[in-house]
Image: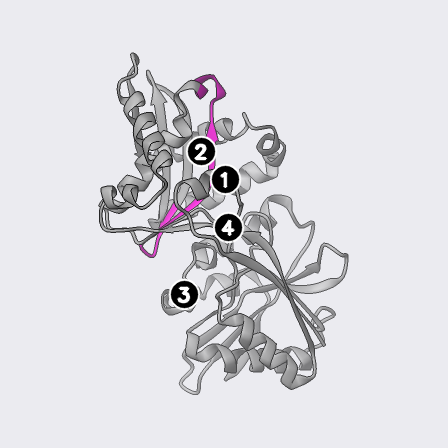
């Protein structure tokens, strides 16, 4: 493998086609590794999560100059104040992160990456601090083996739960597979919304010309929650707008609302990518709490996903109980640290 470092945004932008072609066959098929997402995140540094950063994306090519590996890295001070090489997208708004490579290439890429970093005069090259890597990722054993071979230390720790639902072929089969009481509640709440004395409807926003306003409405719904209101700084609002615009242009944004008598009452910001639905965020107007419209919209989104052949409904990070009531299976994301 022939490794090189990308240090500027124009260099990074020029990799778009190769980057996304490799992402499509990578062991990690997540929207947070798409080129357009990475660019949007970098330009906002995670909505102000990081005060500074230096691009340090490492690419690997074979003897035919074909791109076979990407370590999407940047240099910053980690949460403990140490200079570190972190994954682009870290930490708060990118649920799943990883390197980009075919599964069979990951062991060789990890060994080549550590050897390459050891030869570079980077202040952070002696510490890799990677968050939000799925526990099932082949990167974990490959990075550990590479670190041990070079005499570097390796550690990992669980960070958060990430429940997901493997989707069956039809809606009734899904309902029959969850708890009887929960099945009754889903049906009852969806039926009550249909029979409400005011018109209730749900829909997707697909018009790019209104997306900025639609996202403003969505963030207004988010802000009814005190914690989310605090999260939505001006920098974060701008960041979420940029991510939504990038996802829409690439064709994998799924922004939905449910409205009561024409008033938007609940919304979900999801990604429809690689035949999976990735549930990114949600917001609800508390004045309509009697209708449980968050559950109603979630039920409709699940039914839509099943009827349109999606294979997985991923709630991503967070162990809120409603996710398990809807039949989610648990898994974890990890924090990996390698020290020279």
Q: What secondary structure is marked by label 1?
A: helix
Residue 40, which numbered label?
4
Would residue 319 be found to the left or right of residue 205 on screen?
right
Q: Residues within 10 Å of mark 1 (few under 14, many from 20)?
A: few
Residue 12 can be seen in this image: yes
Residue 9 screen position, x and y as percent: 55, 60
Q: What secondary structure is marked by label 2?
A: helix
Q: Residue at x 45, y 44 (%)?
A: 324
Query: Do callouts 1 and 3 mark residues in contact (Cβ within 8 Å)?
Result: no
Nearer the camera: disc 1 or disc 3: 1
Question: Which residue does the numbered mark 2 point to in the structure image?
Answer: 215
Q: Is residue 1 above or below residue 21?
A: below
Q: What secondary structure is marked by label 4?
A: helix
Question: Which residue does the numbered mark 3 point to in the structure image?
Answer: 23
Residue 321, which numbered label?
1
Q: Residue at x 55, y 58 (%)?
A: 333
Towards the viewer: 78 or 199: 199
Residue extending farthest to the bottom is 63
Q: Quadrant of the C terminus?
A: bottom right
Q: Residues within 10 Å of mark 4 (few under 14, many from 20)?
A: many
Q: Residue at x 27, y 51 (%)?
A: 168
Mark 2 or mark 3: name the one nearer the start of the chain.
Answer: 3
Give the CA distance from mark 2 to mark 1: 27 Å
Mark 2 or mark 1: name the one nearer the start of the chain.
Answer: 2
Give the CA distance from mark 2 to mark 3: 27 Å
């Amino acid at each position: 493998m022939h490794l090189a470092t990308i240090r500027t945004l124009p260099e990074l932008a020029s990799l778009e086609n190769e980057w996304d072609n490799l992402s499509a066959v990578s062991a990690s098929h997540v929207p947070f590794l798409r080129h357009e997402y990475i660019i949007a995140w970098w330009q906002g540094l995670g909505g102000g999560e990081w005060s500074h950063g230096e691009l340090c994306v490492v690419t690997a090519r074979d003897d035919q100059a074909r791109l076979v590996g990407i370590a999407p890295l940047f240099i910053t001070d980690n949460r403990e104040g140490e200079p570190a090489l972190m994954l682009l997208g870290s930490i708060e708004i990118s649920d799943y992160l990883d390197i980009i490579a075919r599964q069979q290439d990951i062991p060789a890429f990890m060994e080549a990456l550590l050897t390459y970093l050891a030869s570079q005069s980077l202040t952070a090259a002696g510490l890799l601090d990677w968050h939000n890597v799925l526990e099932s990722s082949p990167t974990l054993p490959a990075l550990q083996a590479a670190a041990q071979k070079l005499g570097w230390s390796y550690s990992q720790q669980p960070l958060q739960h990430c429940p997901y639902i493997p989707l069956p072929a039809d809606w009734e089969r899904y309902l029959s597979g969850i708890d009887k009481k929960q099945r009754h509640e889903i049906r009852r709440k969806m039926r009550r919304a249909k029979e409400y004395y005011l018109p209730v409807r749900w829909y997707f926003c697909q018009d790019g010309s209104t997306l900025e306003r639609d996202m403003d409405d969505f963030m207004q719904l988010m802000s009814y929650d005190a914690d989310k209101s605090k999260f939505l700084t001006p920098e974060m609002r701008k960041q979420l707008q940029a991510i939504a615009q990038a996802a829409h242009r690439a064709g994998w944004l799924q922004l939905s609302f449910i409205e009561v008598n024409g008033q938007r009452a609940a919304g979900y910001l999801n990604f429809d990518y690689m035949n999976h639905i990735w549930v990114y965020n949600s917001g609800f107007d508390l004045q309509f709490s009697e209708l449980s419209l968050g559950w109603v919209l979630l039920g409709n989104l699940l039914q839509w996903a099943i009827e349109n052949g999606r294979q997985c409904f991923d709630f991503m990070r967070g162990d809120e109980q409603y996710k398990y009531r809807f039949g989610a299976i648990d898994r974890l994301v990890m924090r990996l640290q390698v020290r020279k």
